[in-house]
Amino acid sequence: MEADHDEPGEKKVFREINVWERFRGGGIAVYRCFEVLPDGKYCVQSRDRFEAPADEEVWRLSEGSFLKLLAGQTPALPLYDTLEEAVRRYERDERRRQRRLST
């Protein structure tokens, strides 16, 4: 199977990086991040939150959704120079989206 690239002759490969966050009241979140190779830039594809105690079935469903999302579209843009900046910007954008939805 030939890889799908953004432009002819351009090879894009991605390194998956999971960034975890723990919450005081219990629960965790995982940011599904990618490093775009060979560019060395980062993006956050999605964020999943799990309540304690974590259920293996919920994790399997999250993994399946993540793979379907990745298979169906190129990882999220924009790209950032650091992983920390990508996560910070993703959080900011998510807060903005939530505010718009709640108004």
Image (tube, grey):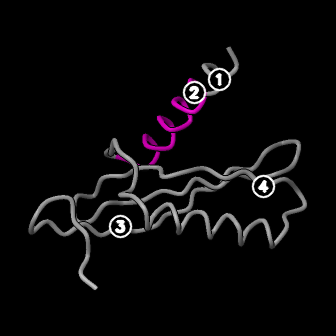
Three-letter amino acid code at disc 1?
Leu
The mark that comes first in sequence, 4 or 3, is 3
Closer to the camera, 24 or 58?
Answer: 58
User: In x, y percent, where is residue 39?
Assistant: 22, 58
Left/right of residue 53 with respect to residue 32 in the rendered view: right
For marks 2 and 4, give the CA distance.
20 Å
Residue drawn at the location 71% of the way across and 72% of the way down: 60
Residue toward you, 22 or 1:
1
SS for dot 3: strand
Q: Quick one: label 4, few (<14), some, or many (20+) residues within 10 Å?
A: some
Q: Nearer the viewer, residue 85 or 14?
A: 14
Which portion, as a residue range, is magenta?
82-97
Disc 2 to disc 3: CB gap under 8 Å: no
Q: Name the residue beneath numbered marker 1.
A: 101
Amino acid tagged 2? Arg
Q: Secondary structure at mark 1?
A: helix
Q: Quadrant of residue 15?
A: bottom left
Residue under label 4, please give it.
50
Report how many numbered discs are placed on residues in the image: 4
Q: Tags 2 and 1 in contact by the CB under 8 Å rule?
A: yes
Residue 20 drawn at (x, y percent):
64, 56
Mark 2 to mark 1: distance in Å? 6 Å
N-terminal of the pair, mark 1 or mark 4, is: 4
Real-space Cα separation, disc 1 to disc 3, in angstroms: 31 Å
- Quadrant of the image containing the N terminus: bottom left
The amino acid on which the numbered mark 3 sits, given as a three-letter code, is Phe
Q: In the picture provided, is 13 more to the left or to the right than 16?
A: left
Res. 87 mark: none
From the image, tell me which residue sits under label 2.
Answer: 97
